Amino acid sequence: MNCCKCQNELITTSFQGLELQLCKKCGAVCLKESVFWEIAKRLGVEKDIVNPFEMEYVSVNEEARKCPLCGKDMGKIYHNGVLIDRCDECRVLCFDNGELSKFFGNYAKPAIGLMNNATFLKNHCEEKSKISEEYESKPIQLQSQEKEFKAGATNGWIVVMLMALFVVPTIVCFIIPFLVPIGITLTVLFMFVSGGFRILNPQEALVLTVFGKYIGTLRGAGFHWVNPFARSKTFGPISLKARTLENGKQKINDELGNPIEVGIIVVWEVQDTAKAVFNVDDYPQFLAAQSDCALRNIVRMYPYDTPEDSHKQSLRGDSMEISDKLKKEIQRNVTEAGINVVDARITHLAYAPEIAVAMLQRQQASAIIDAKRSIVDGAVGMVELALNKLEQNKSIALDEQTKANMVNNLLVVLCANKESQPVIRNNLS
């Protein structure tokens, strides 16, 4: 295919998953109807706003350009200050360099300035996730909206030293009879104050409540003293360490409906202790359930595998990109639970046992076909080389019948799976 403007050869390339024909010399692009509407969709331009395939042709004082696909004359349409070449038979549009941004610039939100076609496709036609905008715009909303804040605490050793100052006076009170009630009061006070001591290990936090009201989270390893009425036994220390979730293998249907087994590993940590404790009942179980849900949502949007010449993403060929989307999807679901997803990776990916044999046979058949194609291509090239050499040397005169027999014999020898056995003819009988 040649460019309709400069007649330079067009190359088939892909920008953001859009397959189109691009001229590297002048920057013109040739878009099929489906590709044009995909660009319009990504920019939020509806068909009822602009449809270049229904516009009337305009007359211009220049020679009609040839369609890169069928070679016929194309007509011109005018819109938004741009003259566009259109072929109704092939349903394609050809834009000169810079015309794409000019055509769509006023419709996009926000408006796009003038730029060359390649830059426009790269920067403003990014492939959107298959998760619908409605789905993305509705994150999980929970009734509880507690957020973590720091609890008031004192160094425990300071409180111990203050208590030690009253030990001797308390003992004296028990020796003097009329001071015994004061000694009992001080003893009860010691017991009450002792209830406020807390010990935290590294990477631990304590969620504190007083009479059912959240008063803050105690962080930092060491010996602390807090309000003795504060209670945390219901919740216990919360680990702030990075933890790993592995839910095992799941059987999920991919985009083509093929059942596949997928396993993931999620590295996570508690970021907001108040959300983790108060917003959900069991935050590790909540994370496990949301990870399963996100995995199913992502896997069903992509095929297990795609041909090598395809630009479409697949679970096997684009595992890093899929894992990144999986991480974002899980994070979106567990943010209200105070969990931070550090990483999410696919650890196991395979066809389900019921179709594994059939898929293996298909892969083997594809490999055999590719190998045979390479063998045939090489054999044809060798035969052509042999015939050309014989004709150049003029050592043997070959008529058409002899050439046909020679080609037949060489192809049999070169393409056979087994070593050929020569047959020697003699004319003695």
Image (spheres, rainbow, N blue to C red):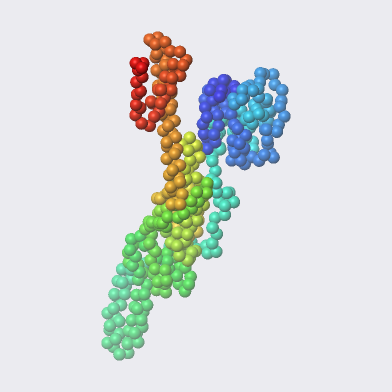
Residue sitting nearer the eye, 370 or 174: 370
Whether residue 258 is visible: yes
Q: Is residue 141 above or below residue 64?
A: below
* Among the 4 quarters of the image, the one containing residue 100: top right
Q: Position of residue 117 (x, y in %)?
A: 56, 30
Residue at 67% x, 18% y: name it: 62
Residue sitting nearer the eye, 157 or 425: 425
So how many labels did they put on this image?
A: 0
Tell me the quadrant of the picture where the N terminus can be found. top right
Residue sitting nearer the eye, 131 or 353: 353
Q: Position of residue 209 (x, y in %)?
A: 45, 70
Residue at 30% x, 71% y: name it: 161
> Taking 53 as reference, is 242 left or right?
left
Of all residues, the one furthest to the top in this rendering is: 394
Q: Position of residue 109 (x, y in %)?
A: 61, 41
Residue sitting nearer the eye, 52 or 67: 67
